[in-house]
Image (cartoon, rainbow, N blue to C red):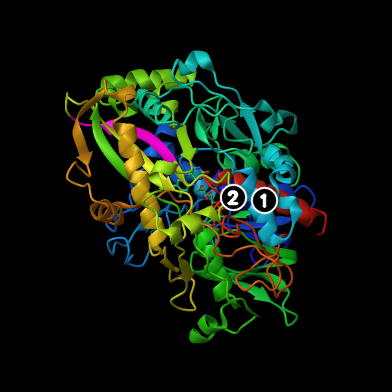
Amino acid sequence: QEEQLQAGKPRNASYDYVVIGGGTAGLALAARLSVSASVAVIEAGGLYEKDNGNQSVVPYYGLIMPFLATTEDHPRQPLMDWDLLCTPQSSAGNRRIHYAQAKTLGGSSAINTMTYHRGTVGSYQRWADLVGDLSYTFDNLLPYFKRTATVTPPNLQKRNAPNATVLYEPSAFDNRLKGPLQVSWANWVDPTQSWLARALQAVGQALNPSGFNSGKLNGGAWTPSTIRPKDATRSTSKISYLESAIKSKRRQPTIYLHSQASKILFDQDKTATGVAVVTEGNGYVISAKKEVILSAGVFHSPQLLLLSGIGPASTLSEYSIPIISDLPGVGQNLWDQIFFNVLRGISVPNAGTYLATPAQQAVALQQYYTNAAGPYSSAGGYISFEKLPAEYRTTLSPRTADMLSQFPTDWPEIEYLASGFPSGTANPTTIGVISAILLSPLSTGNVTIRSSSISDPPVINLGWLTDPADGETLVAAFKRVREMWNSSAISGIVAGPEIVPGATVTSDADILNYIRQSAQPIWHASSTCAMGKKGDSGAVVDSKARVFGVNGLRVVDNSVTPFSVPGHPQSSVYMLAEKIAENILKAE
Ligand SMILES: Cc1cc2nc3c(=O)[nH]c(=O)nc-3n(C[C@H](O)[C@H](O)[C@H](O)COP(=O)(O)OP(=O)(O)OC[C@H]3O[C@@H](n4cnc5c(N)ncnc54)[C@H](O)[C@@H]3O)c2cc1C
């Protein structure tokens, strides 16, 4: 397949549209545009099926890929990951976080943990207000969400989990549209998750009757995953959008694999004319007859804009890059959602327990191959959202309370996840994990460059916990997680005292210190090329994703959302690709 994708690619060729980055947004967009135009996709990585094997195909492996580790000394996987390290985080233990970002055809859809849900009505209303375009309200976006995905209801026989009731509104999807992305509920439920879900429900986060795809995020739900139900394999932008285009036998995008864009080129009228590309050390130009579309992701899209002369004039001057458009917002406004864990021993098994020995793995493999079921088919699924209840808000300072009150009323502040891993001992068998993710971060970070060369990685300051409000909110969430662990609903399975951070951590200062030392990325970074109104100081693109100050250039990926949509972003990334593809095809 790689040869097929590589064969006969003309260098110095010309296409109607040149898309930089064959990732989540890039391939969705390219597939739609290629219906009526010639499209080239420039992708720095290769094929994940070859470079990462089952790790990117079998859902269970998606949860345990070694190179997703976040420490500086993480295992390297240079064929798949950009190996990005952030600057030392002064408010998070001075740690340099390894922030995984996929370098492969399919982009981060080939390494993400596959959770699929949408944001809230209020969050998209905020988006519409910020960009001055009512087409971004939830009701108006719904047709684009529907266009992206085909949903398959849970197979209750295979799930075989009476405590994992799926509730959702079928009307949030429309399978008649044959959305390429496959969205389904895993054919196996991890007992650790279904047990710990009871604790989340017991403290007041009841099952949400409409699921999380109808604009409401409160309470809990078994969410679907981007899994193809037929064979329980990962549904990526490559498998869904690109391969549908290939199978349809109509015109399809031309894919340049192992090809890194180094610069966007402009004529004297500041119209994008093409892209400078490097493949195996050789440089050449791919020309765009109509537009260049930048979809290189949250860190590399701002990097490429800067290298091409679009960004804060001071940065461009520092590296002697000729200024094409002085846009102070490029690389600013980085939003990131972070999380912490609280660990206790529990006596119920988890997926890893069923895969502990070669004999068990053989049984599970049989289930997986013959029935698309069993532990290998599962990628998790239970999540829960809330605004912190009143009794947990009493320790918030007036400033923090005021800042949190600026979020839309339906925007949850915290997401909770339950998971587990084998303890390696007989008692307790499993280490249970309840995690809390900050969905209302008030700290922001930034991305910049360290030279005028694409061979130097972008400089990423995540800005974690630099605003004291975030620490206060997370300390409150930490106490809420302890309430969950102490719930009588799970007292029968909890074995022994808290393992991490441990019962000695009780004061707010100690809890905050634990959070600073251990906070982790959930890899939802966004908004470094934020969409906004013309003239807004931080805005980089308008509501049709056109870059201000130049012609023929759009940015379409998770860097252009004005903020991190609450929860997991991939549904919004696909939606945006559909929406902007329509704009482009209608010449808007
Ligand atoms: C480990 C992980 C887990 C996640 N889990 C979830 C989840 O469960 N649910 C969810 O909704 N979201 C999840 N996300 C987030 C979600 O996957 C991303 O927000 C989304 O995929 C981003 O899409 P994108 O198009 O912006 O970028 P990407 O999909 O990352 O695509 C960018 C592409 O551009 C290419 N590129 C970059 N620079 C260049 C260059 N100079 N030249 C050529 N190509 C270039 C890259 O190689 C890549 O293929 C997760 C992300 C990660 C990393």
Label 1 Cα crowd, 10 Å radius (few <14 / some 14-19 / many 20+)? some
Picture coordinates of residue 555 (x, y %)?
A: 64, 62
Quarter containing the C terminus:
bottom right
Quarter containing the N terminus:
top right
Write the start and end of the magenta stretch as one range.
415-424
Identify which residue, 123 or 189, lies in the foreground.
Answer: 123
Residue occupying the point 54% across, 82% down? 316
* 174 versus 103 height, above or below: above
Picture coordinates of residue 446 (x, y %)?
A: 47, 68
Q: Residue furthest top?
A: 157
Q: Is residue 404 left or right of residue 476?
A: right
Identify which residue, 428 or 295, lies in the foreground.
Answer: 428
Task: Label 2, secondary structure: give it.
Answer: loop
Q: Is residue 18 visible?
A: no
Q: Is residue 575 visible?
A: yes
Contact between marks 2 and 1 (CB within 8 A): the answer is: yes
Which label was assigned to residue 429? none
Picture coordinates of residue 380 (x, y %)?
A: 43, 31
Q: Which residue is mark 2?
A: 408
Q: Which residue is mark 1?
A: 125
Quadrant in the picture for residue 163: top left
